[in-house]
Image (cartoon, grey):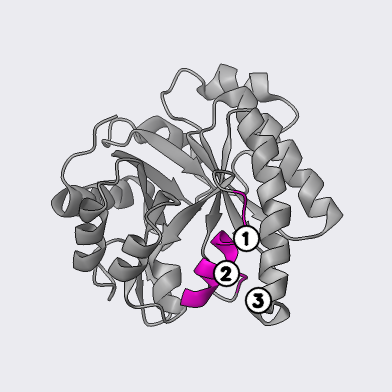
Amino acid sequence: MKFAFSQDTQDVATLFASYHAAGYDGLQLKTDQYPPYLDAPQRFLDEHGGKPGAASAMIAMWSRSTEATENLRKIIKFGAAVGTELLVVAHGEKRGLFKDDDIRAAAKQLSALGAEARALKVKLSLHNHFDSMVMHRPDFTTFFNAIEPGTVGLTIDTAHLAKSGVMDMGGLIRDMRGVIDNFHLKDFRAGEFRVLGDGDVDFKPVFAAIHDIGYDGWVCADEESGADVRAAMAQCHRFMTRGLGSASA
């Protein structure tokens, strides 16, 4: 498997300068870290293209609106130009707006976009999210039964599962093994995201399930606690290697 780091920090210079030395194979860029380059992919490559995995994945918000869909197409094209493997799609509409038929319709819409992305060698990966379309355990099955196979993968976010009340994370991972292509490991305690190891999420069944399914893709420390960049990189990497062993690119 490959380890990535992601942090919602304005200190992007340290982020890009430090991740490889800290033991990570790539970055998964947050929604505000790549838009300045959307119309200038060569500038991104000039500044960061020499760093392996500098844009291994990008996180993007999407809703069913025409504007959001066209923006996602623009991000897909940018990702193709800079060598992005995964576009991690977080859905931005409230869960209360969705019945099962709405989830299925949105799945078909995102699946069509996923087919466009695959033609450009980028893969869409849906990110489970608190108070969003795929939040509760049955939502995962409803959504992925409606997509065209191979067009959309699944990013499992541990803290958003905990926040959403989905506690059998190992069971979910085993059930969804056929579509999982990314993990966001994030801790959670007292309503707040925490650095890995500082929260209440029980990662033992998560790590066991990852091993049991023979997963060998991206595992990302998705750091949203506001901690210092270098300190968070180091702590998260120690936590991941203790639980999963060393990554290999």
Q: Picture coordinates of residue 84 (x, y %)? A: 54, 32
Magenta region includes residue 193: no
In this rendering, is residue 224 above or below 179? below
Q: Picture coordinates of residue 13 (x, y %)? A: 48, 35
Say what amino acid the circle numbered 3 marks.
Answer: Asp
Say what amino acid the circle numbered 1 marks.
Answer: Ala
CA gap, disc 2 and disc 3: 7 Å
In this rendering, is residue 31 above or below 35? below
Q: Quadrant of the C terminus?
A: top left
Q: Are marks 2 and 1 in contact (CB under 8 Å)?
A: yes
Per the image, the residue denoted by label 2 is 142
Segment tinted magenta in the rendering:
132-148
Q: Residue at x 24, y 32 (%)?
A: 248
Q: Are marks 2 and 3 in contact (CB under 8 Å)?
A: yes
Magenta region includes residue 142: yes
* SS class, disc 2: helix
* SS class, disc 3: helix
